[in-house]
Image: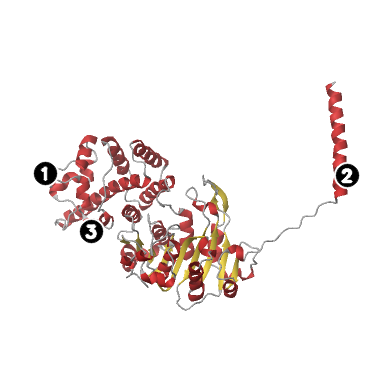
Amino acid sequence: MMTGELKSQVDKIWNSFWTGGISNPLTVIEQFTFLLFLRRIDESQLLEEKKANMMGTSVANPLYKEEHKKFRWNNFKDKDPEVIYNLFTMPQADSDNLTVFEHMKQLGNSAGVFSQYMKGATFMIQTPKLLDQVIQMIDKIKMDDRDTKGDLYEYLLSKIATAGTNGQFRTPRHIIKMMVDIMQPKKGDTICDPSCGTAGFLVAAGEYVHENHEDWFHEQAFREHYNSTMFTGIEFDSTMLRIGAMNLQLHGIDNPQLIGRDALSESNKEIRDQFDLILANPPFKGSLDYDGVESSLLKTVKTKKTELLFLSLMLRMMKIGGRCAVIVPDGVLFGSSNAHKQLRQTIVEGHKLDAVISMPSGVFKPYAGVSTAILIFTKTNSGGTDNVWFYDMQADGYSLDDKRSEIKDSDIQDIISRYQSLDAETDRTRTDKSFLVPFDDIKNNDWDLSINSYKEIVYEEVKYDAPSQIIADIETLDVERNKALALLKELLS
């Protein structure tokens, strides 16, 4: 559980980073992450040493050899800040001329998925005082409590909301949770986010399993699947990849499949027909040269727009019967270009489009006011769309301004419950928040998926009195006003 005291400590250290000249939230989180990792690997070796002592053996492949003993968290955390800082910044002659940080970078696969992506990592904490502050705060965290350390990291990641730079827009956690609750991950699912960022969708899918199917973990086969093959994330930004790896590990997913490459490029062409469930919020804005896009994606839709290319990618990556829930900008729903129409037709006619959930434009504030929707579809390669369920979300539990303050109004639970019982939606009319639209209506409307193309608005007739009656009422009010004014003058005289 994330306590108020822990939050205030994080806020204090965060401010110290900023006053120390590190103003990029991603950089701050990354530096936090390095130190969290150092504590984790030391505690991992302590556990292995305890087991070895009980068995009267030695640790087979220690992360820390004897000559690197001084680099271990429990050996340096209580030392003087200057001494600690020197261990991080000055090569140690008696330890292979390494620093704590350089030793960490050399651990490789033996230390887990996070350490695989340390190439290019840089230690940027600039003062002994700040380094000591962060170490002491991290040392107080209950690392054996999945909820506490997971909540701490989520609180750190929420700070990205202060940035919104370089397109690093963080999907609101409650929207991610809603999408996961709608899709209900299954026991044998392989789940992928092809633009995973901080791995929020994958973490939420893991939390869904813990909250709803704790009994699955009683089976060794499922535990192995959960920790190694259930979750895959693709991300080309190495900093985001490291942060995503730590986010997953702190939430109890030890060895997820994380792939450091551009999902749309030729280097990713071998991933096809592989996943049961895709959850994603791919980049909205941007375009690529045709030469930089994997050729099979252009066969589905010839375009340079990343939001369309990612939809093509998801169709390629899913197994037959695979499901997808993806956030798209509204332009995908009604864009008039050939590429927009072609992709919508492919999804509706060639596969099975299940739902279009229209979200209010303030959902992504303070980053941007763009209107978005969630597309939910199933890969069939043989059609199957009979009716598409539309929902007009008007509230998500937060104000739709830049402050995003919590409010009572929210359609989220209604969306989840209605999606799980679509058979009951047949009696809904197009004046309701949600309704079904037949395949033929969509086809005849040039494959338009905008809810406004199908929603009917009921105008309430307002009857007014005749002008003569209104004039008479005004004259009566004037008489009463003059009487009151005369009375007031009399009282004051």
From mark 1 to mark 2, how far is it between C-alphas? 101 Å
From mark 3 to mark 1, how far is it between C-alphas? 25 Å
Q: Residue furthest bottom?
A: 382
Check whether the beta carbons of the residues at disc 1 and disc 2 lie within 8 A of each other.
no
Inspect the image, locate mark 2, and give the three-letter code of the amino acid beneath it: Ala
Numbered disc 3: secondary structure: helix
Inspect the image, locate mark 1, and give the three-letter code of the amino acid beneath it: Asp
Inspect the image, locate mark 3, and give the three-letter code of the amino acid beneath it: Asn
The residue located at (22%, 44%) in the rendering is 74
Residue at the disc numbered 1: 94
From mark 2 to mark 3, how far is it between C-alphas? 88 Å
Numbered disc 2: secondary structure: helix
Check whether the beta carbons of the residues at disc 2 and disc 3 lie within 8 A of each other.
no
| The C terminus lies in quadrant | top right
**Between residues 413 and 156, which one lies in front from this camera angle?**
156
Question: Does the image show residue 302?
Answer: yes
For mark 3, does the 10 Å Cα neighbourhood hold few (<14), some (14 to 19), or many (20 or more) residues? Answer: few
**Between residues 329 and 251, which one lies in front from this camera angle?**
329
Name the N-terminal-most of marks 2 and 3. 3
Residue at the disc numbered 2: 472
Residue at the disc numbered 3: 109
Q: Is residue 352 above or below residue 471?
A: below
Query: What's the mark number on residue 399?
Result: none
Q: Nearer the viewer, mark 1 or mark 2?
A: 2
Residue 446 coordinates in the image, percent (x, y): 57, 71
Name the N-terminal-most of marks 3 and 1. 1
Answer left or right for 77 relative to 16. left
